[in-house]
Image (cartoon, rainbow, N blue to C red):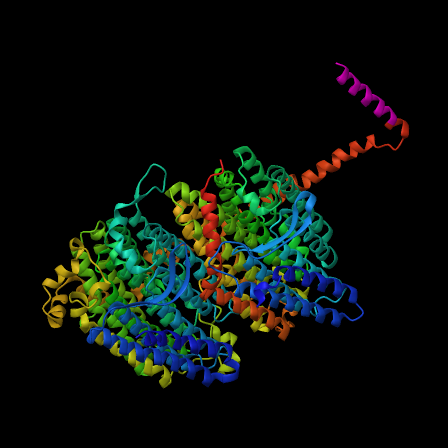
Amino acid sequence: MENIYLAIVLAPLFGAIVAGLFGRQIGRVGAHTVTILGVAVSFLLSLWVFKAHVFDGAEVYNATVYTWMVSDGIRFEVGFLVDNLTAMMMLVVTFVSLMVHIYTIGYMQDDPGYQRFFAYISLFTFSMLMLVMANNFMQLFFGWEAVGLVSYLLIGFWYKRPTAIYANMKAFIVNRVGDFGFILGIGALLFYAGSLDYWEVFAEAEGMSQATISIIPGTEWSLLTVACILLFIGAMGKSAQVPLHVWLPDSMEGPTPISALIHAATMVTAGIFMVARMSPLFELSTAALSFVLVIGALTAFFMGLIGIVQNDIKRVVAYSTLSQLGYMTVALGASAYAAGVFHLMTHAFFKALLFLAAGSVIIAMHHEQDMRRMGGLRKYMPITYITALIGSLALIGFPGFAGFFSKDGIIEAVSLSTTPGATFAYVLVLAGVFVTAFYSFRMFFLVFHGEERFRNVEHHAHHDAHHADDHGDDHGDDHGHGHHGPVEPKESPWVVTVPLILLAIPSVLAGYVVGPMLFGDFFGDAIFVAEANDVLARLGEGYTGVMGFIVHGMMMPPFWLAMAGLASAWYIYMRKPSIAAAAKARFEWLYKVLDRKYGFDEFNAFVFAGGSVGLGRALWRFGDRLFIDGLLVNGSARAVGFISRYARFSQTGYLYHYAFAMIIGLLVLITVFAF
Amino acid sequence: MFADWPLLSLVIWTPIIGGILVLMAGDKMPDGARRLALFFSVLTFLISIPLFVHFDRGTHEMQFVELLPWISTFNVNYHLGVDGISMPLILLTTFTTVLVVIAAWEVIQKRVSQYMAAFLIMEGFMNGVFAALDSVLFYVFFEGMLIPMFLVIGLWGGPNRVYATLKFFLYTFLGSVFMLVALIYMYTRSGSFAILDFHQLQLGMTAQVLIFLAFLAAFAVKIPMWPVHTWLPDAHVEAPTGGSVVLAAIMLKIGGYGFLRFSLPITPDASMALDWLLITMSLIAVVYIGFVALVQQDMKKLIAYSSIAHMGFVTLGIFIVFMIYNNTGNWQGAALGIEGAMVQMISHGFISAAMFLCVGVLYDRLHSRQIADYGGVVNTMPWFAAFFVLFAMANTGLPGTSGFVGEFMVILASFKANFWIAFLAATTLILAAGYTLWLVKRVVFGEIANDNVAKLQDLNPREFLVLGILAFVVLLLGVWPAPLLEVMHATVDNLIQHIAVSKL
């Protein structure tokens, strides 16, 4: 088995190295062939691994590949832990990655950085697989930061754009804030368990929950709670939870395929995966679970609200991703890890689909991203239209679509949870359902229905769209088509539409595994839930099969809230657009708050970025230059100079001065000895 | 077969003799001087390889020992030997010198033979510092090493080189004078100048504290620790690229080496009593210097400050061991700290060398180190940009690069001592990312900033070779640090056993 796991990980790495270092030699076709082959091998083998583990009941695999180093008796190793949870993640990662690789052929065809792009996304696939397959915290941290690195490289892919290179730096640094907590969390676990191996740490969980640590002198904190919250801070960075979410919307500066792969389907779900993997730890700390629950609920609702006021098609999907990540986090906090991971999986499919569909629209609109300049695209782009509809229905949780099962599972689980903060979270996630449906279909109607507003646009007004994906500007010459006058939209080529179709299939069907995944023993020992917290087990008591679940769901509030959201979007954006304008005018303060994204960016830029630079400047000017160098170093040099200026008066060079000094000295000595 | 050779004498004297030969060859044939220097640096590197290969990983005893009487009146001996702490540093020295010689190939046009000779002789002295087991011999090499560096900065340096050289020389010299006093005091007590005899010397607390402070003066300046760090940015800014590389990659490490070879084993009780001082200074180095690095306008100054912050991890890793013992009551975790400090030293040798070489590549083309003069370099120098981003990431401690290993170990070890120490140490994750990536953003990415950048040529094969070798080493050590760790275990374990026994 080890060779197969190694092949799964190394095949994309090989592709990345070849395409990255020899991109010029092998050319465009060579680059996409080698990387797609690498990922395809990875995907097929993952499929086989999935079958072996899930259907044939293969043993859980946990073994070391090689010893990274040994220090102080602690083994730092690189190794794989493959159980059903890992197998599912591997499948999701390699499948979405493969779709995105193929899609990229169409999306990036005119880009001069074509080979580089393929190298990056293959490198990403490698990093993500290392992350999900890790059997220890060191490797987890490696994957964790490596995906962050690739994300950095890809957000800044169009490195000439000031917004892109600002966004990628911001993404990396905000993620580092999370990693800062994460590494301390690892430190806390190692402190007690003396090992970085998952299983060895889990074995100590019980003891750790009894142990205490004195963080503020005089107080005692549960070591496990501290460790879990620190680990979760890492998850907040990677999975963009409030208040570390600020990097994700800006990451839309990257090309759309990576928004689908990294910033929707896989990397941002790493935090969710990590918490699920660490369930034996989190389960023993109610305080940590409560923290997770509240943060998730805040993200789920308040980030969804921002989605309503966005006009950039990618930003709507981005805020939707934030909100859905919040749902997953809520599930984790409610101890419904399986529901969180289930939603992770369905979301990976339908959100990747929505992003790629948005990308397809963006291609057709010649890199226009403002939805106010779209509309009526349904008849020009039938495949994109249908797949986007499937994606949207899955997102809002329409009965029968994938998102319905997973999201309903989460909401019901929260309603049963007794973790402190569960009621608060329940209200927010329920309200979030309406919001989700509203912004999703607002986008859907604005893009695909109604008036063909792109014909009204006199010229391609890039200067207006402050966030527009204007990479056409950089590579405009390569495109060979003008940016002036109305565009004639047409359906995208097959390399774009085929991935859409292939992603649409699981966006519908993936939900039907709800039985085994939520209520069955799919995850086995991979996920541990304490007896008292096991909301899914209680939920499962009433489970009578998929149809029963659907029928039951249609009688519950989430369904009706979703329908209300869909209907409101239809009414406001299809029937009476004046309502939107009126509401905007009436609730201008609210609009402003949402449009400014609650002011997080301004706050961070002013307090943290500005504050750091100001502090650095002050320390440098006053600490280093004025005090240490000015006063101590040059000051002592000056003091020496000053003293010697007077001391040298005694060195006159006249013999009688020296003779006089000698006589005085002799007298003094005689006096001393005589008495 | 090599085990019986006087390898340590060879790695010391081959470059020194080579340097003298290069110097005698003169500047009539600069190419000849270059080739001769390359020959000797490569030869020295090759001679040093058996030190690693034939190193006995199972013992803490000194290996490759050579002992000859030197000044028998004072019982001073020509005594050489290496253990797991010094051997890797010798390899770092011989390796770095080869790169420095290659990197100077076309860049240095004036007084080529003198430049090359200075670096070769310096290499010999630095190897001597690491290999010396007699403290007088150590002191001679320790001071002797300053002279070629003084000349390198003073002759091939920038406009403000006189101030920088004087500052560099006086600062480091002042520190080492105190050390000399301490060495002589211990000679009067033990009748020997052998460092290993000092280790066994029983000393009272007052004597230990005074000796500790004397060593601190020497090594804190060298490494350098806050607040005696301000000579370093000035020296780096004025030094030619090769000078910066040797300074950052090797000379700073002598401070860390000194703590491990002298301070800890000779004055364990004073080290434990004053650990709070060293830990505080280290944490200030990490946090304070991190902020200061953020606002630097000069690339070399920025990297110099970043070096100081990274050296903070070395001193933190070394002195955290006492706090671990005080907090947990045992020495579990101490080896993690010290080995982390060692790895950090080696890794920083590669990364800082690479960063300074990258700045050198830019400086050779535009003759400016100001960040503001660059922007969008990736457009004209894609290969350079790739290397620069890689080394920048290594500088931020990205896993998979060598920069991660040491920092990770030290942070994990600090957690055993105190949560807040780990907390402050871990801020480097954010601060290093901040100053390094901001540098990358302003220099490498963006539109082409000006006509000068538009005219830049990408790396030539020679530069590519140098940076490529460093990239390989940085990645290799990042994915497989085990071989480096293996040579240290026995020595570090012995050191910890030694400091665990009070001398009082």
Please tell me whether residue B99 is drawn above or below residue B286 in the rendered image: below
Q: Position of residue B67 (x, y in %)?
A: 62, 53
Q: Quadrant of residue A384?
A: bottom left
Q: Nearer the viewer, residue A61 or A592?
A: A61
Q: Number of marks in the image?
A: 0
Q: Read off the magenta span.
A: A659-675
Measured as percent of width and height from the top left, residue B221 is found at 61, 46
Residue A669 painted magenta: yes
Along the horizontal axis of the image, is A167 left or right of A651? Answer: left
**Residue B87, image x, y percentages:** 55, 58
User: Horizontal and vertical percent for residue A131?
Assistant: 35, 66
**In-front residue for pair B408/A73:** A73
B315 lies left or right of A230: right
Residue farthest to the top?
A675
Locate the N terminus of chain B by quadrant: bottom right
Dominant secondary structure of the residues highlighted in magenta in the image: helix
Q: Residue at x 86, y 28 (%)?
A: A658
Q: Is residue A157 left or right of residue B91?
A: left
Horizontally, is A17 left or right of B452 in the view? left
Question: Does residue A313 appear in the picture of this structure?
Answer: no
Do we see residue B215 in this rendering?
yes
Does residue A18 belong to the magenta stretch? no
